Image: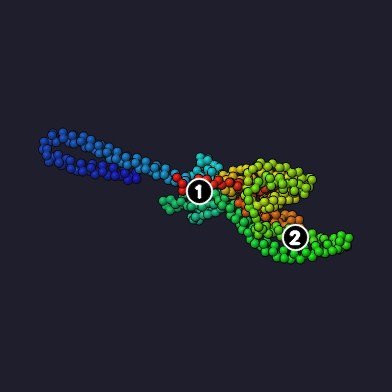
């Protein structure tokens, strides 16, 4: 645009100058015959030419300058508008050169990578993403430059965040890839949600299986319980066969309890939801459970919700507590501390975004922790799967924590687990607070 404007001014000047040189002397000699007068007017003509062309150049340059200033102002406005639009895009955007240096990035990248814009400019992409000094072995940016195509991959950042990245080639005026634009989207929450959905689907499928097994098993168990009980009552304690038959009967009773768990897991039990005080329920339940626990396990309680209610089924909540307490007891074969606490918390959008689950509102938090052997990350990822257990054969069914997960879902709650090897485990369960709806007492239709 600049060259075009300058060329226009030069052409106008050349045209006017050529016309003046070609015709001005001819016109003067036509009107003025006296040589001395002609010489004087030629001098005036020269000064006139200088003045006119000077003014012409002034106005031409001034006009072009104003156009250039307006164009630059418009370019700045467009750049500002475009920059504002780009900053509103929820994805991170990075421009990378052929030598893998970052030329530009938007403010979203600051949050995703925890790196200020001025710190990232002119740094190599592998220095920012992976803290490396050499290019990555598998590099989507390099692939985009070499193959001249769109590249899409999912990477895990150093912080553990999961990013979906798209690398788009940018072509220069010679149709060669001069740089690439990298679009970065944080899909950590989405991946967590997908994992939770898969886990929920597994549990739902197992629930259908458990329901069928429970009913078939119950049909087989009924005559065993009935006849073994009858034989026990007939034999008497001194009969040599009594211990064997009594063992059959007690095993059948345990099987009956297992059926009860299976039916609860498959949501076939009749439930009665009503407002209840979790602290009162825990106090009553702990009086019952305390004698069952070993003497080398110390129980600490910290109940703080008082008169705050949750909308729940009493039997199901007791089962949740029983399963978690039993799990904690088994994790402390040499004794330890079992802590049970309640508190009132507020879940906000920040909590939801950080943890990948939840709905804003008030919740009663039930926390059950132990000082047992803990668990590694692989086990922690699978503990809510049906029939998954780390206990020895015949020491556990693998349904306890699956039932807990299932019951918490029925109560529109959330459960999370924190554990570290040799340091213990903490289960945190969030139950929505029961909010009493106050009806409007104003009469309708009145004035």
Quadrant assignment, res 382: bottom right
Q: In this view, does 428 lie above or below 222?
A: above
Query: What x and y, as percent, mark residue 270?
Result: 65, 57
Q: Quadrant of the N terminus?
A: top left
Mark 1 neighbour density, 10 Å: few (under 14) some (14–19) many (20 or more): many
In this rendering, position of residue 25 left or right of residue 432: left
Residue reaching furthest to the left: 33
At horizontal 71% and vertical 60% (from top left) the residue drawn is 259
At horizontal 49% and vertical 46% (from top left) the residue drawn is 443
Q: Is residue 418 visible?
A: no
Q: Name the residue under label 2.
A: 255
Quadrant assignment, res 253: bottom right
Q: Quadrant of the C terminus?
A: top left
Query: Disc 1 on helix, strand or loop?
Result: loop
Mark 2 neighbour density, 10 Å: few (under 14) some (14–19) many (20 or more): some
- Give the foreground label among 1 and 2: 2
Sequence-wise, the earlier of marks 1 and 2 is 1
Q: Can residue 170 be seen in this view?
A: yes
Q: Name the residue under label 1.
A: 91
The circle drawn on residue 418 is: none
Query: Disc 2 on helix, strand or loop?
Result: helix
At horizontal 74% and vertical 56% (from top left) the residue drawn is 396
Query: What x and y, as percent, mark residue 244?
Result: 84, 62
At horizontal 58% and vertical 46% (from top left) the residue drawn is 436
Q: Distance between the residues labelled 1 and 2?
A: 55 Å
In this rendering, position of residue 368 left or right of residue 227: left
Query: What x and y, as percent, mark residue 431?
Result: 62, 48
Q: Is residue 211 above or below residue 13?
A: below
């Amino acid at each position: 645009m600049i060259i075009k404007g300058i060329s226009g001014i030069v052409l106008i000047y050349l045209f006017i100058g050529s016309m003046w040189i070609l015709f001005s002397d001819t016109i003067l000699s036509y009107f003025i015959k006296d040589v001395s007068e002609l010489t004087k007017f030629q001098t005036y003509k020269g000064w006139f030419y200088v003045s006119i062309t000077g003014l012409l150049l002034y106005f031409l340059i001034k006009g072009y300058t104003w156009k250039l200033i307006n164009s630059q102002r418009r370019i700045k406005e467009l750049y500002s508008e475009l920059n504002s639009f780009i900053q509103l895009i929820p994805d991170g955007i990075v421009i990378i050169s052929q030598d893998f240096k970052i030329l530009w990035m938007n403010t979203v990248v600051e949050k995703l990578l925890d790196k200020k814009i001025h710190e990232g400019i002119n740094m190599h992409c592998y220095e920012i993403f992976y803290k490396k000094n050499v290019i990555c072995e598998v590099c989507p940016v390099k692939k985009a430059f070499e193959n001249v195509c769109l590249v899409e991959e999912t990477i895990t950042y150093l912080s553990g965040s999961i990013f979906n990245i798209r690398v788009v080639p940018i072509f220069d005026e010679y149709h060669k890839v001069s740089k690439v634009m990298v679009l970065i989207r944080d899909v950590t929450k989405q991946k967590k949600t997908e994992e939770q959905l898969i886990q929920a689907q597994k549990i739902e499928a197992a629930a259908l299986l458990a329901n069928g097994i429970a009913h078939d098993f119950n049909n087989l168990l009924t005559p065993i319980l009935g006849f073994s009980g009858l034989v026990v009552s007939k034999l008497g304690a001194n009969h040599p066969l009594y211990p064997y038959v009594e063992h059959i009967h007690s095993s059948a009773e345990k099987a009956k309890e297992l059926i009860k768990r299976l039916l609860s897991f498959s949501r076939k039990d009749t439930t009665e939801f009503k407002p209840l005080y979790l602290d009162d329920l825990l106090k009553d339940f702990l009086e019952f459970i305390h004698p069952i626990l070993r003497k080398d396990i110390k129980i600490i309680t910290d109940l703080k919700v008082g008169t705050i209610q949750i909308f729940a089924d009493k039997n199901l909540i007791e089962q949740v507590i029983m399963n978690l307490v039993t799990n904690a007891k088994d994790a402390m074969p040499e004794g330890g501390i079992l802590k049970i606490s309640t508190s009132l918390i507020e879940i906000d959008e920040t909590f939801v975004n950080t943890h990948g689950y939840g709905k804003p509102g008030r919740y009663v938090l039930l926390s059950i922790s132990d000082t047992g052997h803990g668990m590694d990350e692989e086990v922690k990822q699978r503990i809510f799967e049906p029939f998954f257990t780390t206990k020895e054969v015949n020491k556990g069914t693998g349904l306890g924590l699956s039932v807990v997960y299932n019951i918490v879902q029925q109560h529109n709650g959330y459960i999370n687990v924190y554990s570290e090897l040799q340091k213990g485990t903490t289960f945190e369960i969030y139950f929505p607070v029961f909010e009493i709806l106050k009806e409007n007492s104003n009469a309708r239709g009145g004035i």
